[in-house]
Image (tube, rainbow, N blue to C red):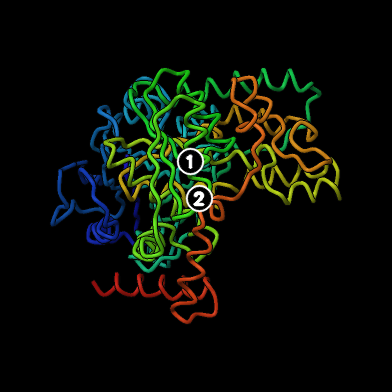
Amino acid sequence: MGYIAALASKRGEDVGGLMLRMLRAQSSRVDGVGIASEEGAAAQPWMPEETPRGDAMIGCLHTKITPLDQPQPITQYGHHIAMEGRLWSWRCDILEMAERLGHNPHQGLRRLIEEGEGSYAVVILDGEYILCGRDPIGLVPLYIGESESLIAAASNRRMLWSLGLEAKPLKPGHIARISPKGLEMEQVRILEQPKAESMSMREAVEQLDKAMRSSVERRVRGLRRVCLAFSGGLDSSVIARYLDLAGVDVELLSVGLEGSKDLEAAEEAAEHLGLPIRVESYGLGDVEEALDEVLWSVEEADPVKVSIALPLYWCARLAVEEGVRILFVGQGSDELFGGYRRYIDLYASMGDEVSHQLFMDVAESYEMNYARDYKVCMDQGVEIRAPYTDLEVIELGLSMPVELKLSRDGWRKLILRRLAEKLGLPKSIAWRRKRAIQYSTRVSTALRRIAKKHGKGGLRQLLEELLSLLRGSWKGS
């Protein structure tokens, strides 16, 4: 686990120094550094002063999340592999990836993406070309950048910024082939909007229960203890129940600004669930202190994204304090089951056609939501696992009739509420009204106060200026 990078010269020039620059752009603590070129692969606990020579390289900044995680890149069947993410198997993920790729990494990667098992991004050096790939959902970020002389890929934008490259996300379910000839894109498997299946609420609840149990069980294999970002609401409470049923020790983490009523609600929900909870409140000074670091992880001056990222940042830091490096989250539920207020308005005006908007929001979540959450947690040395982003759960959810998700009288996520009841959750949890995290934690209000304090016309202006300063200070370091 950690961060991966790939770099190739279009002019056949050595890129060793530039690869080091990319890796050094990632400033968070890591447990090891690995680089592979045609000369071979090597990993060590510290940043090397020099690299092997070559016009194509891959690299990895390794973070040991579980005992089975090992230094990367690794070499198998003559090619070098670096992977970020999981395949949800019992084995070490990078060794499983190497076996699944086989002797022909292009064909192996196509098969792996088509099967849709896992949440991962991978870079493979095979001779003079590099393959980059992502699973069909895209929880784990990977970006591509290109200039007249270079093509690069990396786990975050700032590694590409260090080379003067602007970053665009590699789309989920795609393979990018990087060679001296340039960049070629190949679509393998992407989400498609299914036709709505005819099913009753009871049938849908049974199917969703089975899919969610499987999703959580795959994500806790080999684990004894995990943390869960917990609001006391529907999404996180359902995951809490499944984690408990799976037999792992789970600690709930709830954060918010001082005076947030949701902290009290989270404690009450934890008592109903019979699970331990840690509740932490923060002040305006804490928000201002964390802002630069969170913005540098998000890599976008987007007020909504930064507002959502801040509570997750605090949860990740609490998980580390608790000695846990895996944080479960409820992301993905709102888009899949109709959790936003605007869906009700669209349902009233569009009827069943709102299902297309739900599908589009799910398909675009890799860029709108997942990258933000993954990066802000991994920068704290914490891996997120998101059961609602499981391919089986998503395909099932997308196939459900809209009337199982939304009602004409304003209720949202009906199917998930019925599932919560089946799991024995009280009505105070199952039928609790949703509030967006940036408002329920009062983070959005705090950020607007900070912008006003600094005399800015708005929060976006403040964030744009801060991000510009952060990029400028890094270039000067």
Is 431 located above or below residue 289 in the figure?
A: above
Marks 1,2: beta carbons within 8 A: yes
Q: CA distance from mark 1 to mark 2?
A: 8 Å
Q: Residue furthest left?
A: 49
Quarter of the picture holding the C terminus: bottom left
Quarter of the picture holding the N terminus: top left
Q: Residue at x 77, y 46 (%)?
A: 344
Local secondary structure at mark 1: strand
Q: Which residue is mark 1?
A: 134
Is 327 located above or below residue 464 in the figure?
A: above
Question: Where is residue 11, by image quadrant?
Answer: bottom left
Considering depth in this image, is 266 or 212 the residue closer to the camera?
Answer: 266
Amino acid type at image mark 2: Leu
Considering depth in this image, is 55 or 438 the residue closer to the camera?
Answer: 438
Amino acid type at image mark 1: Arg
Q: Residue at x 41, y 24 (%)?
A: 220
